[in-house]
């Protein structure tokens, strides 16, 4: 758990965003419960407080925050407002029409970019985004998230020279919420 995370904020997050319903992961596994980032993003006071707390995790050399679609986007907007840093947004793939961009928002070329996402499990989405940003000329060595699930993401990111700083680990949630999303 982040050093400046309060028990009250943990309880608010658990109450708002830990949902005891079936949830299917991209690999087909079904969880009995999950962390719903949209419920977090839909609560302006909670989103503001999470972003203010996460701002302490942003490395000093950061020049741009890049949010992963879709869960990382509202967090990135709120974190950008809390820190004053510009924001970029990572599409899951290059847009086929209009701008045809994969990266929207602030310029990232030559910049120190920190990735932002809601939940990190295996780290695959962060690695894909980091690869895209690195190809575009950005320096990416750090990622932030609200919740880290112990499914190998931290180790996998480290293999690609990226540090993960979560606001919470699954074990930090109150017992009923932690047991529900295991």
Image (cartoon, rainbow, N blue to C red):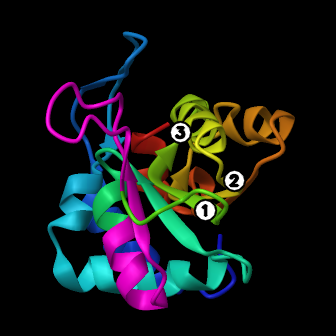
Tell me the residue at 55%/36% (across/down).
132
**Mark pair 2, 1: CA separation:** 6 Å
* Mark 1 burial class by Cα count in 10 Å: few <14, some 14-19, many 20+: many
Based on the picture, tell me whether residue 179 belongs to the magenta stretch: no
Answer above or below: position of 160 versus 42.
above
Label 2 to label 3, Cα distance in Å? 9 Å
8 to 129, vertically: above or below: below
Q: In the image, is residue 102 above or below residue 17?
A: above
**Are the two marked residues, 2 and 1, in contact with CB atoms closer than 8 angstroms?**
yes
Q: Which residue is mark 2?
A: 140
Residue 182: image location, x then y, percent:
50, 36
CA separation, marks 1 and 3? 11 Å
Question: From where the camera sits, is residue 68 visible?
Answer: yes
**Residue in the foreground of this view, choosing between 174 and 2:** 2
* Residue 3 image position (x, y, % from top left): 69, 83
> At numbered mark 1, what does the secondary structure look like: helix, strand or loop?
strand
């Amino acid at each position: 758990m982040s050093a400046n995370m309060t028990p009250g904020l943990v309880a608010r997050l658990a109450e708002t965003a830990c949902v005891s319903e079936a949830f299917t992961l991209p690999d087909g596994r079904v969880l009995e419960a999950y962390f719903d980032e949209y419920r977090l993003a839909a609560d302006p006071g909670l989103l503001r407080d999470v972003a203010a707390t996460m701002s302490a995790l942003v490395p000093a050399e950061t020049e741009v925050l890049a949010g992963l679609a879709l869960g990382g986007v509202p967090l990135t907007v709120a974190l950008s407002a809390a820190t004053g840093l510009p924001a970029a947004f990572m599409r899951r793939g290059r847009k086929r029409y209009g701008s045809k961009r994969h990266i929207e928002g602030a310029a990232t070329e030559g910049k120190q970019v920190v990735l932002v996402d809601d939940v990190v499990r295996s780290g695959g989405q962060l690695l894909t985004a980091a690869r895209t940003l690195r190809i575009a000329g950005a320096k990416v060595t750090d990622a932030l998230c609200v919740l880290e699930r112990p499914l190998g993401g931290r180790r996998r990111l480290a293999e690609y020279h990226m540090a993960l700083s979560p606001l919470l680990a699954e074990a930090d949630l109150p017992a009923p919420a932690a047991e529900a999303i295991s």
